[in-house]
Image (cartoon, rainbow, N blue to C red):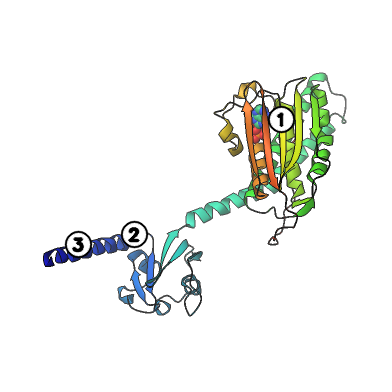
Amino acid sequence: MARDCILAIDDSKDNRSKLEAIMHHSEDPIIAIGSDENITLMNRAAQAVFRVEDESIGMPLTAVIDRTDIIELFGLGGKERSSRQAEIQLDNGRVYLAHVTIVKHVGCAAVMQEITRFKELDRVKSELVSIVSHDVRSPLTAILGYAELLSRAGPINETQAEFIGRIRRNVHNITALISDQLDVARIEAGLEQEIECYHLPTLIQDVVNGMRHRADVKSQTFELELPSHLPPSHGNPLRLRQAVRILIGNAIKYAPERGKVLVTVNQQDEQIVMRVQDDGIGIPAADQPSIFEGSSRAEEATRPRRRTRLGLPTVKSVVEHHQGQVWVESDPGKGSTFTIVLPITAEPPEQPSAERPPLGNDRAD
Ligand code: ADP
């Protein structure tokens, strides 16, 4: 019995020293303090980051690391303690994401991961978005302007007119592509905060009025079924209009000549259900899960006109920002039905105020 106890103690000592060795050699800085706010563990990486000597064990953390962000992270000095995370920016430019975990009756421990490279990538991405937004759109607008003016500057022959038309179409396509990219980036960055009261049937009717001619051009039957009554809801009508326009635009685009597009809206409990149905080429089952991610492998050759693969990701972002859901049911060769479900939000949700950048152009489908 006594021998078993001795073996168990040895075993636990062995495990403890293994654990300590792992923590000491971890490349992520780790700091632990006891309930008395004194340091119980500070691994080598943490000592190097905060330029601290080995003898810091047992000393108060505040005496060893004189940083307000660390004090707040650990909830020291009588502040309420809870598990939390914070970014710690060092003077040498390095940035760490620190997670603090509370261990009841023991104290708390912080593990820090260096995220300097991710912060830098994020900065480069924002810079690129702003460069594209301002510096690429302006010359494109100028090219378009001059292409329009060419025919007014003197007589042009048929071939020249065709070339001018191609220049204009291509510039429109690049501009739409840029706008789609910026829209997705903005929505993902949470910059779309403007909340207003909207009435979905009115919003859809507006979109349909502006798009019906496209279905007429293809001699398609376009039907719209709206409920006689639907309560107003709160959200971003500009963005919802964009999502509805993308779905209806796709339905018209992928339905055949003399095909059919049906748009219906219903209320189910506290939700609005909108369906956009077409009898077009459909989407292969293998492609359906990826089309909302912008990486559809759908057969290019059978798809008419410009393809940016950004329409459906935008729809998904908009719908999810309204706490809704979107999905597709599709039968290749028979057609597709896209369904959007949005909660009816009678009261505007609490929103933090945010400066809103100007809206990009809508895609020119
Ligand atoms: P784009 O239409 O510019 O390619 P989208 O993100 O709007 O970009 O659509 C992604 C892909 O999903 C399309 O390329 C097409 O293959 C498929 N798709 C979308 N809507 C439909 C539809 N109504 N019918 C058939 N295929 C569709």
Residue 21 spot, x, y in % from top left? 27, 62
Residue 210 spot, x, y in % from top left? 83, 35
Residue 101 spot, x, y in % from top left? 43, 65
Q: Is residue 152 left or right of residue 297?
A: right
Residue 142 occupies quadrant: top right
Q: Amino acid at mark 3?
A: Asp
Q: Amino acid at mark 1?
A: Gln
Residue 13 occupies quadrant: bottom left
Residue 11, numbered label: 3
Closer to the observer: label 2 or label 3? 3
Q: Is 48 located above or below residue 177 in the figure?
A: below
Q: Is mark 2 within 8 Å of ligand 1?
A: no
Can residue 124 be seen by looking at this rendering? yes
Q: Amino acid at mark 2?
A: Ser
Say which residue appears at 61% left-offset and 24% top-offset: 300
Whole-number angstrom distance, CA of label 1 to CA of label 2:
55 Å
Q: Nearer the viewer, residue 210 or 97?
A: 210
SS at mark 2? loop
Circle nearer the N terminus (1, 2): 2
SS at mark 1? strand
Q: Residues within 10 Å of mark 3 (few under 14, many from 20)?
A: few
Q: Check whether the beta carbons of the residues at disc 2 and disc 3 lie within 8 A of each other.
A: no
Q: Which residue is mark 2?
A: 26
Residue 277, numbered label: 1
Q: Is residue 85 left or right of residue 32?
A: right
Query: Split into 4 quadrants, where in the image is the N terminus?
Result: bottom left
Q: Residues within 10 Å of mark 1 (few under 14, many from 20)?
A: many
Circle nearer the N terminus (2, 3): 3
Q: Nearer the viewer, residue 118 or 225?
A: 225
Q: Check whether the beta carbons of the residues at disc 1 and disc 3 lie within 8 A of each other.
A: no
Whole-number angstrom distance, CA of label 2 to CA of label 3:
23 Å
Say which residue appears at 38% left-offset and 68% top-offset: 31
